[in-house]
Amino acid sequence: MLRSLFLRIVDVVKDHDYYFQQQSDGLGRMRLSPLQKVTAIFCMLAYGLPADATDEYIKISESTVIGSMTKFCRAMVEIFAERYLRTPNANNIARLLYIGKKRGFLGMLGSLDCMHWKWKNYPTAWSGQYARRNGSPTIILEAVAAYDLWICHAYFGMPGTNNDINVLESSNLFSYLAQGSARFWKKHALHDIMTACIIMHNMIIEDKRDLCAPIQEVREAPTPEVDTVADKTTRFNQFIARYRQIKDKDAHISLRNALIDRLWEEYTNSES
């Protein structure tokens, strides 16, 4: 993360939540600055440090860091979720499909993967539901990223006993996000932390994009004509039909073989 982006986040969070504004105590001495609080939070998120590890370097107590973490992540979600967790529109989808086609992958929007996040301070009553075969309780993050690593879909909260197929079927539809194990007890706090990490990931991608890169020449695609169906019953039936097509093994094998043949034909005699 560039320094300019870090300072931008500090300023916006400070203006959004009074907790991060520097205040004075009863003797008139200035208390912790927003830079101290946010720096401690970033140390925990980026390096997986425990809350008390930041005391010597940043001069901030463990309880203050924990409180700052929950308030910071909630503020990030409230401020930036609408922009950095937005649903792809028709033009975004058309652009991604066009770029995938140029790269030889017809119908590809991005890459999907699941990550297990170790839950250290889990409730004992939930240990069996969230424990994997190795005995460590985890929570699963499912994410879809575009070619430039922009995360355009994320689903967090599935118990770690599920595999990737179960997560895909149960959700509404990489990883250095929040390194280390989760040290909070409540799932809504963990959800805010993971969501804040995804938001900051997309902010970094946006901040470091090379607008002069060749791939950006095909960044904008013509807006496709999309027929909007207002009837919920019709939309649901269409969803069920698409779901059955996805689960059709014969169709899967046929599409796989067609893709292999096309790639083989296109790149076998190419100069590269």
Image (cartoon, helix red, strand yellow):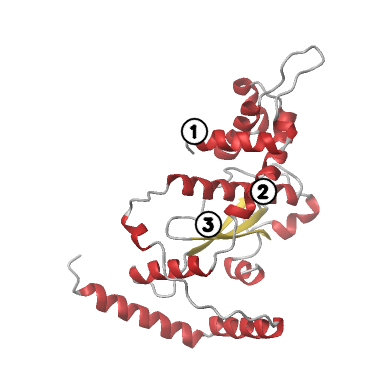
Q: Secondary structure at mark 2?
A: helix
Could you give the CA–CA distance between mark 3 and mark 2, rounded to whole angstroms?
15 Å
Q: Nearer the viewer, residue 225 or 139?
A: 225
Q: Looking at the image, tell me whether mark 2 or mark 1 is earlier in sequence order.
A: 1
> Residue 209, image x and y in percent?
42, 49
User: Which residue occupies the extreme bottom position in the image?
Assistant: 250
Which residue is under mark 1?
Answer: 3
> Residue 220, image x and y in percent?
41, 64
Q: Amino acid at mark 2?
A: Val
Could you give the CA–CA distance between mark 3 and mark 1, rounded to whole angstroms?
22 Å
Instruction: Name the residue rendered at 60%, 69% in the picture.
Output: 168
- Does residue 26 appear to the left or right of 147 in the view shown? right
Q: Tell me the quarter of the image containing the C terminus.
A: bottom left
- Does residue 180 appear to the left or right of 29 in the view shown? left
> Residue 210, image x and y in percent?
37, 49
**Image position of 65 with respect to 250: above or below:** above
Q: Looking at the image, tell me whether mark 3 or mark 1 is earlier in sequence order.
A: 1
Could you give the CA–CA distance between mark 2 and mark 1, rounded to whole angstroms?
21 Å
Q: Secondary structure at mark 1?
A: helix
Q: Nearer the viewer, mark 3 or mark 2?
A: 2
Which residue is under mark 2?
Answer: 77
Instruction: Name the residue rendered at 70%, 81% in the picture.
Output: 232
* Crowd class of label 2 (few under 14; some 14 to 19; many from 20; radius 10 Å): many
Q: Is residue 200 visible?
A: yes
